Amino acid sequence: MNENQTTYPTGAQDEEEIDLVALMVTLLHKLKPILLTAVVCAVIAGGLAGVKILRGGAVSAEDQVAYEEALAEYQQKEKDYEFAVQQYELTAKSNEDAQSSVQEALKQAQDYAEKSLLKNLDVYNVWTAQADLYIDSGYKIQPGSAYQNVDPTGALLAAYQKQLVSGDSMNAAADAVGVDVRYLKGVVTVELSQNDSGEYNGVMTLQAYAADQQTAEKILNALLGRLDLIHDKAAAAVCSHSVRVIDQSVTQGVSTELRALQQTSNEDVQNLQSQLVELQSARQALDDNLASAKSTWESAEEPALGGGAASSVAKYLLIGFLLGGVLACGVVVVRFLLDGMVYSASELNRSTGLPVLGALASDRTKKAGKLDAKLYQMEGRPDGSADAEMLCLMAQTIRSRAPEAKNILVTGDLPADQLEALAAALQATEPLRGQSVTAAESILKAAATVPHVVAADAIVLAADCTVTRTDAVREQNEKIVRLGKQILGCIVYE
């Protein structure tokens, strides 16, 4: 495992690089507290201005009370309108995306309905070109033998059935009648015959449906022309055999089965049209609701005190709001710069040089609200939906990097139950099912972890962006290196 030895990037421990994008995202995550702080400061500043005005005798106490009540009502209307606009923008974007998706699907469905051979068939006047094939594998039961070879007939029939209705065979049929291959869906069938005991008897029926005799024959002949190639492939993959056409015919008749397929396609188009109408109605309702909210807001008048009192209060409110916002942003920036928390898996790799096996969703990400969830999605953080696949991928990476490792240790400064759950999840994956995966607390906190580190064949360091500090990761790595071991990789809960 010496090939996994890592070193810190030059200057990583002496000077931290400020990620402005991460800082901006952090500010957006704290948008609600920042706005709340700004509003509180604005209210305080407005209150101080009101007190100052009262002491100066600019207005009466009754007027001041009425003004404050009217101002609170006005501010509430403003908040309601801003919230309505925010909700409208989010919902309208989702509606637009849904309409675009449904319109594209409807366009494809209508195009298929227009050009599909199946959709344009008259089920009461269908031409059917049919060929009965017999596939002989030469299989025989050995009389008096307790052991019998497996009859390959079923496998051969399945191979022919799959090859005839997919791939090059359908392309050949489409070229024969001059249409795109997707418009042949539903007009070619392959049926396998069975005896009374349910065993395949080697007989296969190939049918092609069309609106006229010539088209049906062209499709069938194109498929029959592929038999030699399919025979060679099946002989190489299954066993040697022979195939011959027993009978070939063209008939005209009624097919109620095709009507059912046509009806399914019609229902698909109708469902898509209904979805589009519903989405358009929902969008109109959104527009109407926003127009109503805008009308209510525009009809509201900001209350004012007599003389210069109103402008003074408004000025203090604005100053308080701006100062509160700046103060809150400053606190967030200082905490971001000083707390030293691991920000993401890529940041951990960049700042410590340790390889990252993968990232999982933390409890913070799983429980995030709509705004935070959207920001996490923009950052590319996992939301938990793919954790199972990621665990399997990380387990396979561990297995490939340390194929001889039997004892794998998962350690870090996470809570013990979280470490144990991670170890159990890795142990349950297919690549590590034969290995021993154990968990131990951070080597910085528990002396009992030292013998686990010494005994481990491979060490995986777990970190959580909500509790793990970057310098703690470095310290754990240094102690593990001093014990003659190397960290195979990190698993980060983002």
Image (cartoon, rainbow, N blue to C red):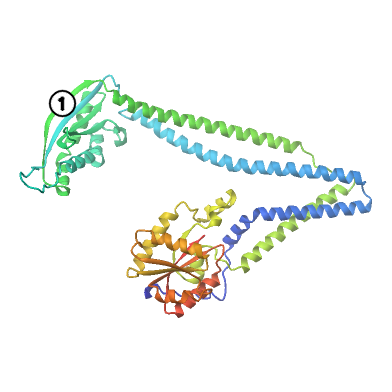
In this view of the protein, can residue 198 be seen by the observer?
yes
Residue 232 percent across, percent down from the top left: 14, 45
Residue 62 percent across, percent down from the top left: 91, 44
Q: Residue at x 63, y 69 (%)?
A: 338
In this view of the protein, can residue 119 be seen by the observer?
no
Q: Residue at x 42, y 33 (%)?
A: 107
Q: Report the amino acid beneath label 1.
A: Ser
Residue 265 drawn above or below residue 137: above
Q: Quadrant of the N terminus?
A: bottom left
Out of 144 and 421, give the one closest to the viewer.
144
Please indicate whether residue 46 sits to the left or right of residue 264 in the image.
right
Please indicate whether residue 454 sits to the left or right of residue 154 in the image.
right
Q: Residue at x 56, y 56 (%)?
A: 364
Residue 88 percent across, percent down from the top left: 62, 40
Q: Which residue is tagged 1?
A: 249
For the residue labelled by badge 1, is the local secondary structure a helix, a strand or a loop?
Answer: strand
Out of 323 and 460, give the one closest to the viewer.
460
Out of 267 and 321, give the one closest to the viewer.
267
Residue at the farthest right position: 57
